Image (tube, grey):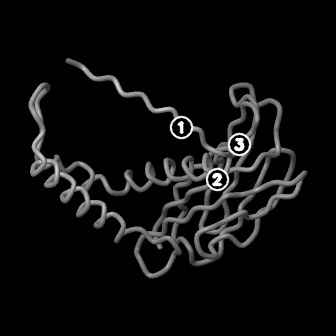
Amino acid sequence: MPIDIKVNVTLSSGQKRVVRAAVVGGAVLAAFSVSVALAAPRNTFANGQPLASQAMNENFTDLDKRIGALEAQHVASPGTSKVSIASAFIDVSGTTYSVGRADGGWIAAVNRTALGEVTVLVVPGTFSSAPNCVAGIQNTGGFAWVTVLSTSTTAVGLTILSNPATNTVALDKGFSLVCVGSR
């Protein structure tokens, strides 16, 4: 007897930003934690098999330990770890970009070089080599894409377009940015 469960959640734009950043950050963190993430669950269940609370609790305890190991590797404010994971929300007002919120002080400045073109300057010493970065558009009220064009130890170049397939209609939009790299 299958059971269908549906959940409808309404989020404010601020909550959507947090969820979007968490998803992007989780994906990046997962990419750097494959050895931990590939571990199988302690207990598995077959279709139709009754669940036992002890087995479920063992799974949750195991997950809690693995998540704790991942969190121990995460550096919310780039510091002494060998890996820096840094995230930020970049806001725009008219043609002026600014840091809305960032982990630690890893962003030195945000410069608009042209319509839809942004350079995020990174504080020297945050990364020892060019980091891997991903970006996502904040609440746009329409379709838009942000693409990371280039990264170095001191800058991340991005472009924001309404149609990346044809490289048309550049836009000034706020975005979230997550970068992971060697310290």
What element does badge 2 sit on?
Answer: strand
Q: Residue furthest top?
A: 1
Q: Disc 3 designates what residue?
A: 139
Cα gap from disc 3 to disc 1, whole angstroms: 17 Å
Q: Nearer the viewer, residue 89 or 81?
A: 89
Q: Which amino acid does label 2 sit on?
A: Ser
Q: Earlier in the sequence, mark 2 or mark 3?
A: 3
- Provide residue 86's location: percent of width, then percent of height: 55, 65
Q: In this view, does 63 lie above or below 108?
A: above
Which quarter of the figure has residue 125?
bottom right
Q: What residue type is labelled 3?
A: Asn
Q: In this view, does 149 lie above or below 69?
A: above
What element does badge 3 sit on?
Answer: loop
Q: Which amino acid does label 1 sit on?
A: Val
Q: Are marks 3 and 1 in contact (CB under 8 Å)?
A: no
Tell us which disc is closer to us: 3 or 1. Answer: 1
Q: Which of marks 1 and 2 is nearer the N terminus?
A: 1
